[in-house]
Image (tube, rainbow, N blue to C red):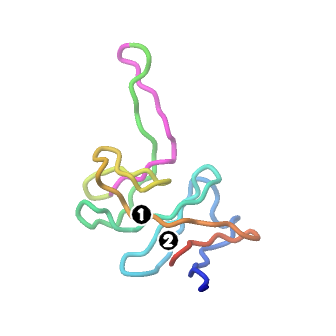
Amino acid sequence: MSEQKRTFVCHVDDLPPGTMKFLPVGKQGIGVYNVKGDFYALSNYCPHRGAPLCLGPVSGEVRPGDEPYELTWERDQEIVRCPWHGWEFEIATGNALALKNHKARSWPVTVEDGSVYVEGV
């Protein structure tokens, strides 16, 4: 049985919550994000028009509140927005927020002995 390939990204301390580390692998590269202590990896390729997705800002989303004209800020640091056309993707899943049939490619991330790895790369 062959062992699955994995790539070292960095030490956990070098990727604090709210930050992203770029991994220059493959054609476009991969962004590895720390979202509130959980690690995720997304392709640096927006499925809309091929923009460098990981150069986009990380934010949350505005949702309607309980009262008229009330808005709430939710999911802080969980969404990445494409720098070209503003498409938004969940960092944890790669799913597009507006169009459910679009998705940015993602990879599993593991942490072992204080080191962060992307699996399958």
Q: CA distance from mark 2 to mark 1?
A: 8 Å
Residue at image point 56% right, 72% down? 118
Q: Are marks 2 and 1 in contact (CB under 8 Å)?
A: yes
Circle 2 sits in a helix, a strand or a loop, which is it? Answer: strand
- In this view, 61 is above or below 95: above
Residue matched to label 1: 54
- What is the span of residues highlighted in magenta in the rendered image? 68-82
Q: Position of residue 74 (x, y in %)?
A: 49, 35
Q: Nearer the viewer, residue 107 or 80?
A: 107
Residue at image coords 74%, 68%:
114
* Vertical relation: 92 (above or below) 120: above
The residue where tag 2 is placed is 22
Taking the view exactly as shown, the residue that stands out farthest to the top is: 67
Residue 62 figure quarter? top left
User: Residue furthest toward the bottom?
Assistant: 2
Amino acid under disc 2: Phe
Label annotation for residue 96: none
Where is the N terminus found, in terms of image quarters? bottom right
Q: Is residue 77 left or right of residue 102?
A: right
- In the picture, measured across the screen, residue 75 lies left or right of residue 61, that is right
For label 1, the SS is helix
Sequence-wise, the earlier of marks 2 and 1 is 2
Q: Position of residue 6 (x, y in %)?
A: 58, 78
Secondary structure predominantly adopted by residues drawn in magenta = strand
Query: Looking at this view, is 63 or 56 the one in front?
Result: 63
Q: In this figure, what is the number of numbered marks?
A: 2
Residue occupying image coordinates x 37% and y 52%: 81
Q: Position of residue 63 (x, y in %)?
A: 40, 30
Q: Residues within 10 Å of mark 1 (few under 14, many from 20)?
A: many
Figure quadrant of residue 30: bottom left
